[in-house]
Structure formats: C-alpha cells, structure tokens
Amino acid sequence: MPILNMIYWATWSWPTPIEYTITWSTTVGSFTPWSFSDLQGFYMSPDGENAYITFWNNWNGRMAQYSLSTPWDISTASQTQYISLTKPNWFYFSNNGTYMFLSTEDGNNIVRYSLSTPWDISTASLDSWQVLNVSSSRFADNVCLSDDGDYIWFGVDYLYKIVQYELTTPFDLTTATNKKELSVSEAWIWVMVKNDGKYMYTALYWPVKQYELATPYDITSTATGIGSYSVTVWEHRCLFVSNDCKYWAIGNNSGWITQYEAVPIS
C-alpha cells in the first residue's frame, strides 16, 4: 500500500497585544492605605498581588507593602510590612522586583536599592553609588523606567518639564546619557511611559491624559492625545499604570487611592 507523505505549512505569530484607552475607564476599587495624609507614591507588582506606597509623617518617611487577596483589586489590600525612608517621593521597581528606584528630596536625587528577595521591601539595601541627580534646586515628582531598564523618565517639581535619559547599562543610573526634556505647562507632573514606549501618560492636577508617541521611548517626538479621564480635583498626588496598560490608579492629598480598569481600543 503506498504511503502518502503530507506536509502542512502554517504560519504563526505572537498575538497582537490588546491596547487600552483610559477614556472609558471603570472603577475597580479604592482604599486609604494609611492614616497619614501625605501620600507620595503608589505601585503594584506585575502580577497584581502586591501593592506599595510611600508617605510622610512630619518628614519621617515610610514605604509600606500590601498583599492583595484578589490580584489587581486594591480594595482587598492588607498591610504586611513597612520600612523607614528619608524624605521619599515616588518610586519604581524593575520588572523582576530585584531593584527599586526612589525619588527623594534628600539631595534631590534618584537612588537605587537592591532587594535580595524580589518584591520584599524588608530585604532592600541602598546601592550607595547608584545616584542620579535631578536638579540642584528641585526634586523628581515621580520616576518611571522601561521594562528593559534602558530608559528612565521623571517629572521635575516646579521646573515645568519631563526629563528622559537613556541608560547604556540597563537599570544602572551611573550610565545615564542622551538627556531629553519636554516642557509642560504645570509645576507638578507625573509621567508614565508604557507598552514598549508607545504610550505616555501624564497627570497634571486632576485630568489624566494618554498620548501615543510617534517614536517609541522618545518623549520629544510628536505626542498624539488618544485618551483622557477626569478625576476629582484633588486626585493628583500620584499616578500608576500597569505594564499592559489595563489598570491604572491615582492618589490624592488625603491618602485616598482609586484604581481603574481601562477598556480595549476598538
């Protein structure tokens, strides 16, 4: 009996990532993480199982860590631990949780911590040589890094600008080069760059805006507005956007954090 050999040729490619717009976001949940009012920063781990905040109490700073019983729902958060920090502002973690970058008013610097146990802030130790000076007079309102650690962005308090650096060695602040600046109209600004450098998010007081960058990872390239969401007037203390742009959160001066879920772009 003859044998028929058949070869089937097929093509396959990675599925196109779902892209989201903040314009028609829905509320997921909210919480007041601490009794102190001076909230500075907020972050959620990529799996949505941990949340972190920084805040002041009469200039004595802390970072608190929370466990979420339901991933990506901050209303299920419960505090697990905290550490003391000097004048902390915004912060950001590397994707694997082994590095933490902190903006501080103590010298107007961005500094790096190493975590011996990923995502466990109790194991954080300061890398004293890892310092990036923001300005001689002002500090960074927030800090954001690309997933691969090749770029860093931050807004500068009362200097009306967003700053971008390229890191020639990923996650190494001492290798910052190719500085770029984007002028803005507000004294305080929070910026996040996500989705392989395609989208930039800003919070200028209460409107949260989403832009598409003509050149990925370049904040000075043409930015086209593709989304906007109005929150209450004092919800402007910090801004967080998840890596896939599905979830975002905004905090206010009273320490209240509200989390939202964006809808897919049709």
Image (tube, rainbow, N blue to C red):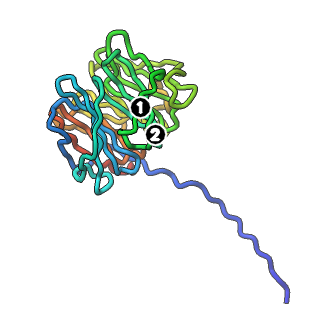
Question: Residue at coordinates 48% horizontally, 50% vertically from top-left?
Answer: 17
Mark 1 surroundings: few (<14), some (14-19) or many (≥20) residues within 10 A: some
Residue 54 shows in this picture: yes
Marks counted in the figure total: 2
Instruction: Using residue 7 as the reference point, say whether residue 43 is left or right of it.
Output: left
Identity, as a three-letter code, of the amino acid under mark 2: Ser
Question: Residue at coordinates 51% horizontally, 33% vertically from top-left?
Answer: 149
Q: Which numbered dot is residue 175?
A: none
Q: Is residue 137 above or below residue 79?
A: above
Reading the image, the residue beneath label 1 is 125
Residue 43 at x, y percent in the picture: 33, 39
Residue 191 at x, y percent in the picture: 35, 30
Question: Residue at coordinates 52% horizontally, 25% vertically from top-left?
Answer: 166
Identity, as a three-letter code, of the amino acid under mark 1: Ser
In the rendered image, which quarter is residue 169 located in? top right
Residue 238 shows in this picture: no
Question: Residue at coordinates 26% horizontally, 32% vertically from top-left?
Answer: 62
State the separation of the CA atoms marked 2 and 1. 8 Å
Q: Secondary structure at mark 2?
A: loop
Reading the image, the residue beneath label 2 is 116
The front one of 172 and 234 is 172
Q: Earlier in the sequence, mark 2 or mark 1?
A: 2
Residue 42 at x, y percent in the picture: 29, 37
Q: Disc 2 vs disc 1: Cβ atoms closer than 8 Å?
A: yes
Instruction: Using residue 207 as the reference point, say whether residue 167 is left or right of it.
Output: right
